[in-house]
Image (spheres, grey):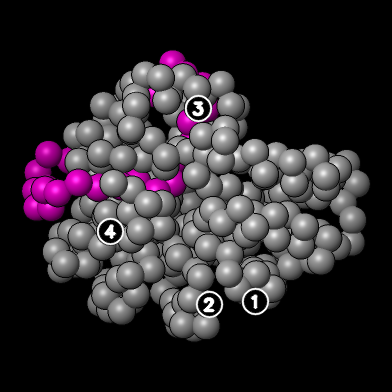
Amino acid sequence: MLDIKLYYNDKIFDAHTHIIGEELIGLFVKAAEKFNITRTLAIIHDHSDLIYAKQHYPNRFVFAKYFSGAMVLTANPDDVVREVNILREQGYSAAKTHFAPFWIHRISEVPDEHQIDCTRFDYFFNAVGDIDVPIIIHVSDPDTYYATRYTDKCLYGTKEQHIQQFSRRLERNPDLRVQAAHFAAQPEIHRLDNLAKMLKQHKNLYIDTSSARWMARELGKDSKKAREFFIKFEDRILFATDCVTRTSEVNYYEGRYFTLRTLLETDIENYPLPFEDQDTAAIGGTFINGLNLPESVLEKIYWNNGAKLYQLE
């Protein structure tokens, strides 16, 4: 990784990570700082981790409170709304929820109406909108997953259905500030046109670059088209990695920061991904093809867009 020179030297905000446990936060922060990451949005799964991070790394993190799709579906709505309403006073600046297909396995009985656009979820999204915080939503998964893990369409549905359901949710909550994780699950080159339509239609929609291997694998397949997309929607894209504090291997964190910054900043071609992409391991791996974005665009993606959405100083 040391043979690639990254030229952007200003501060960067990572708008999508997960803190799970206290012991690895310091390692994570140190790795991030090597790549100019000065602020980080951390999705919290246990409130004690927020307390620890706030005490030991003041002004380093912005926190998002996690609401699993299964919880929103099965818990008492009054209890969920209560958790939303105390979100700010607990120290959170955002909510996070997950509607990828596999979450239906996390509950014993799945109702017929469990999609993100179902009216039974209105109470939750309305409550988040009422307190005026952004919500990060995991909409769907890579095309590769639908070819291998979600082949049972009767059980999981199709990716096209999931994207349409998400679009209907945006229509139902036009004032809700939404950060759609993983490029709204549409970094695949053939999906960029649809994503562009969604961004034009829904002015409350932002997207992030979380999942380095997914972004590198798909956006690099047509770096010219991907570059044009980034420039066109430079005000709506946030830099993000989806790093999770689950390993003491520093290369896990550094590899993801290196991959995304190399993808966005350089014009490198066919550079091997510095960690395994299981989705392409059997066919030779994933390679980075850089988009070589202008510095003015990087400034927005790396900092300004996130600073505006999360009111960073």
The answer for how far apart the CA atoms under marks 3 and 2 are is: 32 Å
The residue where tag 1 is placed is 171
Name which residue type carries label 3. Answer: Leu
- Indicate left or right for 311 with 18 as reference: left
Q: Is residue 23 within the magenta segment? A: yes
The residue where tag 2 is placed is 202
Is the magenta region chiefly helix, strand or loop? loop
Magenta range is 1-25
Q: Earlier in the sequence, mark 2 or mark 4?
A: 2
Q: Nearer the viewer, residue 162 or 295?
A: 295
- Indicate left or right for 182 with 60 as reference: right
Q: Earlier in the sequence, mark 3 or mark 4?
A: 3
Q: Residues within 10 Å of mark 4 (few under 14, many from 20)?
A: many
Residue depicted at x 81% and y 66%: 119
The residue where tag 4 is placed is 304
Q: Position of residue 158 (x, y in %)?
A: 69, 69
The answer for how far apart the CA atoms under marks 1 and 4 are is: 26 Å
The answer for how far apart the CA atoms under marks 2 and 1 are is: 8 Å
Determine the image quadrant of residue 124.
bottom right
